[in-house]
Image (cartoon, rainbow, N blue to C red):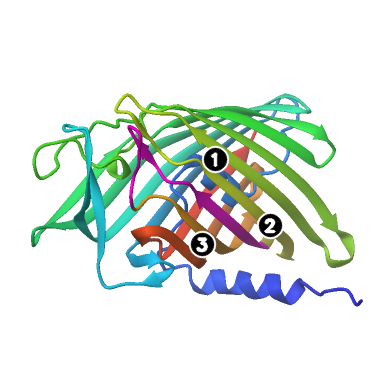
Amino acid sequence: MGRLDLKPLVLGFAAAAAMARGAPAAACDSSTCALLTRGQSGTLAKGAFRMDLSFRYTDEDAKRQGSQAVGDVYVPKVAFTYGSIWPAFHREIEASESFVQMDLGYGLTSRFSLEASLPLHTRREHTVAHFGITQRYTTQGIGDVLLGARFALRPRLAAGLAVQVPTGRHRLDGDFDGSILEPSLQPGSGAVGFVGTLQQTGRISSLDLGWSVEASYQANTRSDLDYRFGNAAILTLNLSRPVAGRLSASLQGKLFHQTRSLYLTHDVPSTGMTFFYLTPALHVDVRGGVSLYGYLQLPAYRYVNDMQLAPRAAVLTGLSKTF
């Protein structure tokens, strides 16, 4: 069998990223998902310190039932005040999310790095209708912090463990009846989460092509409101190569799956999903250990449980510096 030439595919998607840089796009809304999108690999050198500042924006106005487009999306209200779920209560019209995130890493040894993700600002906007009256909800604040470590199991194979700390507010009120807003509108989850990752990297010298495969699983606990977000699994495949000088391009395929959320003893309708993203990206190394990057996430496949708003596309951009 002849060798597959991946060079045109990688460069083609990189060009698409450059041409589409003005378009808004959508990513997962967790720190873990942002880290896997960037494909940050391996551990840091002993004594090295890395700081990364990123911005991501999600446009979520694709109305879906299962994998099919629909005209209207009706989702439930989790009525914490009454301890019940009111099905098909809201008609969701459109939504968007934006995040400013700082990620820090320190090489404790050449095989063991400490890491932290700090969601400095989370902003969510949802436009919904109640009985024909349209309302726009906007919430903002710090999100949930992620603290963890990454360690080398062997050359090119690294594992990571992290804990999501519920630092973001999760009891913001202001719904039409004065009650607590939906969990999906809150800056934080109000619950602890446990994250495990595994990453294998490699290189195809004949094509000057780097590759990595990474898997992540996040198990969530219940908040003090007795609400638990669904557990999330992510699998990514990254391909990257130099383009010219300090400029490199990459292409990522990312499969994201989240189970249904749970309130008290009940599955929450219109929660849980499976998405597959194609993500072209550009990366520039500038002087002084600083690098700039931009990722465009394009959902190639979207499936939601029941009815939900799904992402149309997403953008992730930022800079990092290693000291």
Q: Is residue 126 above or below residue 323?
A: below
Q: Is residue 67 left or right of residue 208?
A: left
**Residue visible at 57% across and 46% down in the picture:** 233
Q: Secondary structure at mark 3?
A: strand
Q: Quadrant of the N terminus?
A: bottom right
Indicate left or right for 321 with 169 as reference.
right
User: Mark 1 to mark 3: distance in Å?
Assistant: 19 Å
From the viewer's side, name the closer residue of 277 and 41. 277
The residue at which mark 2 appears reads as 238
Task: Classify 206 as above or below 159.
Answer: below
**Mark 2 surroundings: few (<14), some (14-19) or many (≥20) residues within 10 A:** many
Q: Residue furthest right?
A: 1
Residue, disc 1: 52
Q: Which residue is mark 3?
A: 297
Which secondary structure class fits the magenta region best? Answer: strand
- Seen at 16% across and 33% down, the residue is 82
Give x and y (percent) for residue 230.
Answer: 45, 41
Q: Position of residue 268 (x, y in %)?
A: 34, 45
Taking the spot 69% from the left edge, 70% from the top edge, the residue there is 10
**Mark 2, secondary structure of its residue:** strand
Chain part drawn in magenta: 249-269
Q: From this viewpoint, is residue 83 visible? A: yes
